[in-house]
Image (cartoon, rainbow, N blue to C red):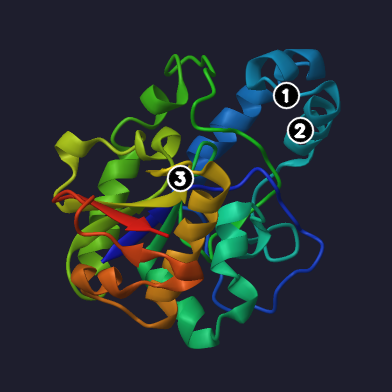
Amino acid sequence: MLIVISPAKSLDFSAPPNIENSSIPPFLNDSEFLVNKLRQFRPEELSKLMNISAKLAELNYERFVKWHTPFTTKNAQPAIFVFKGDVYQGMDIESFSKEDIHFANQNLRILSGLYGVLKPLDLIQEYRLEMGTKLNTSKAKNLYEFWGDKITLEINKAIEQSAGEKVLLNLASNEYFKSIQKNKLNYEVITPVFKDYKNGQYKIVSFFAKKARGMMSRYIIQNKIEKVEEIKTFNSADYHFNEELSKEKEWVFTR
């Protein structure tokens, strides 16, 4: 079973982890192409392209200027340790044992606008590039077109090599999961959905749903779950599987 999650906008490179088995992203040449394109934008142009503040645009302009290959453990860090958004707070990587990290590296992938798809221990440098960004290059008019079927083929390969049942568990946002071409995916997809009871009905509350995706990832990794049916036992933060609201490929967890 392979889990896919989204990256995070918040990054923290201040505390390099002591990891021996880091790796290089599979599409680093493509990433370098995108960075070279992004270097052509002035900060005010990046602000418009990415719909971000002038301060964030200046920060990311500097990031793209500094970005360089080859990646080493001195100029880059493993992806799973530097992403700090809601999903990653829910995952709580600091609680992982060495065995957990190894299992995650086999059975979890992070989708990325700049890197395409990452193993948890793939090295990355600081960046911001959301998958929905309409970055026009000589190869494509946006990032979905740029990545084409590369991400999907890499996911197929990762599922084949993953432990246990050959299923894709989609814990990514819609923006990122759209980068996977379902017509070229060789495996079944199960999408967990997390809902909270509010004003008399169950609703998706974005902040809680993101954290729950991370908590479910942690639950699978720390329990070494290899059969997708077993995730129905997930019960972190009072979430429980709701059979009545669930569909065949969309499993709803409520609280």
Residue 84 at what x, y percent from top left?
67, 56
User: Residue at 70% across / 74% down in the picture?
Assistant: 17
> What amino acid type is highlighted by mark number 2?
Asn
Whole-number angstrom distance, CA of label 3 to CA of label 2: 21 Å
Left or right: residue 20 compared with residue 146: right
Left or right of 146? Residue 247 is: left
Mark number displayed over residue 52: 1
Residue 225 percent coordinates (x, y): 30, 78
Q: Amino acid at mark 3?
A: Phe
Front residue of 77/130: it is 130
Location of mark 2 (residue): 60
- Examine the rendered structure and indicate whether residue 128 appears above or below residue 49: below
Mark 3 surroundings: few (<14), some (14-19) or many (≥20) residues within 10 A: some
Q: Nearer the viewer, mark 3 or mark 2?
A: 2
Q: Nearer the viewer, residue 170 or 26?
A: 170
Q: Are marks 2 and 1 in contact (CB under 8 Å)?
A: yes
Earlier in the chain: of badge 1 and badge 3, it is 3
Type of amino acid under label 1: Ile
| Disc 3 secondary structure class | loop
State left or right for residue 50 relative to residue 146: right
User: 244 left or right of 77?
Assistant: left
Secondary structure state at the residue bearing disc 1? loop
SS for dot 2: helix
Pointer 3 residue? 27
